[in-house]
Image: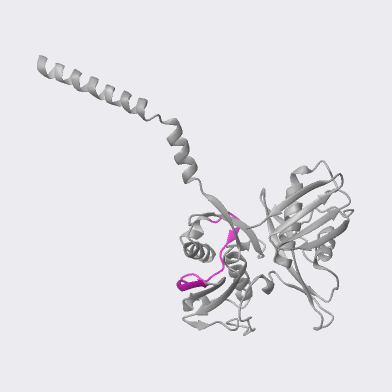
Amino acid sequence: MLKKSSLRRIMVATLALFILLIIYFFPTTTPIEESLSYIEKQEMPIFLVDSLEYIARTTIVQESENTNDLILEVIESLTINSEKSNYIRDGFKGIIPEGTTVKEITLENGILTINFSKEILNISENNEEKMIEAIVYSLMEIPEIKKISILVDGEKLRALPNSKKKLPEFLDKSYGVNKIYNLDSIKDTNKTTVYYLSKYDDYYYYVPVTKISNETGEKAEIIIKELKSTPIYHTNLISYLAASTNLTNYELLENSISLSFDNHLLANLNDEDMLEEVKYSIALSLRDSYGIEKVLFNFPENEQEVMAFN
């Protein structure tokens, strides 16, 4: 009995010493902090269907670093009842028909060719154009992708499956999204995409609307004019840009645009919480309309702010 008791005490003492040595030589604070920062996930933009049936810009947690894996992750998030769809934010949903898979992807010289299974054709006529918009706008948030070609079972998708409306040879954001037509003539049309704000519960997000009209003028001027006015044709969409805001000058540079304003962007200067959202509405609209990567905001008293994408 004495021998067993002594042996037990020796084992306990040895174990305690071993633990102390580990703590001394391998302090826990820094490695734990480093490991936590290492596994921290970043978010990426994606365009899903919101509660009002718009194609809307929200975010998902990005799991992949490799471009091809990221493409597959985006498509899975856009697909109804996929595993990834369980992690979509409340108020949003996918639009690609359930059971659709990606058979093959190739990305060469900025052109993504993506081959879907035939299940993608199981889309209603009401949603077929929205589906293309969601795919194009989501995938083009990946910097390496400049244009997209869609195949179905190896065959080029040249038209929407139900309406038979022709598709461009290559798709990009010039295809438009949530399109509004205000045309007097089919000649001299102008296509401008403007990002409005919308809200689900306490979550603000952006909804792009492509206005196709005969309106003349530079896109920068049209965007500011649209955001200053009440969007009558979209009463559920919001713009907080003050009606008194004046764009005094703008200059299109290489991959960027510089804007000069004569006053602040908000009517209520106390509502600073909305200022970033207003700037992003302008910047996202200019990015998609001009294909630029940087927007420079210039204000009185030499105040400048830069918003960069990619």
* Depicted 125 relative to depicted 67: above or below: below
Q: Which residues are magenta?
A: 88-107
Q: 291 or 55: which is nearer to us?
A: 291
Q: Is residue 182 magenta?
A: no
Could you tell me which quadrant the N terminus lies in? top left
User: Picture coordinates of residue 207 (x, y %)?
Assistant: 69, 61
Residue depicted at 51% across the width and 49% down the height: 41
What colouring style does the render use?
Answer: one colour
Could you tell me which quadrant the C terminus lies in? bottom right
Q: Is residue 92 magenta?
A: yes
Q: As drawn, which residue projects farthest toward the front?
A: 254
Q: 66 or 177: which is nearer to us?
A: 66
Chief secondary structure of the magenta span? Answer: loop
User: Picture coordinates of residue 262 (x, y %)?
Assistant: 89, 51
**Residue 265 in sight from this viewpoint:** no
Residue depicted at 19% across the width and 19% down the height: 10
User: Picture coordinates of residue 27 (x, y %)?
Assistant: 40, 29
Q: Quadrant of residue 96?
A: bottom right
Horizontal side of 271 relative to 46 (left or right) equals right
Horizontal side of 73 relative to 268 (left or right) equals left
Horizontal side of 253 relative to 42 (left or right) equals right
Q: Quadrant of residue 235?
A: bottom right
User: Picture coordinates of residue 36 (x, y %)?
Assistant: 47, 40
Counting labels gives 0
**Residue 22 in sight from this viewpoint:** yes
Q: 176 or 253: which is nearer to us?
A: 253
Horizontal side of 22 relative to 91 (left or right) equals left
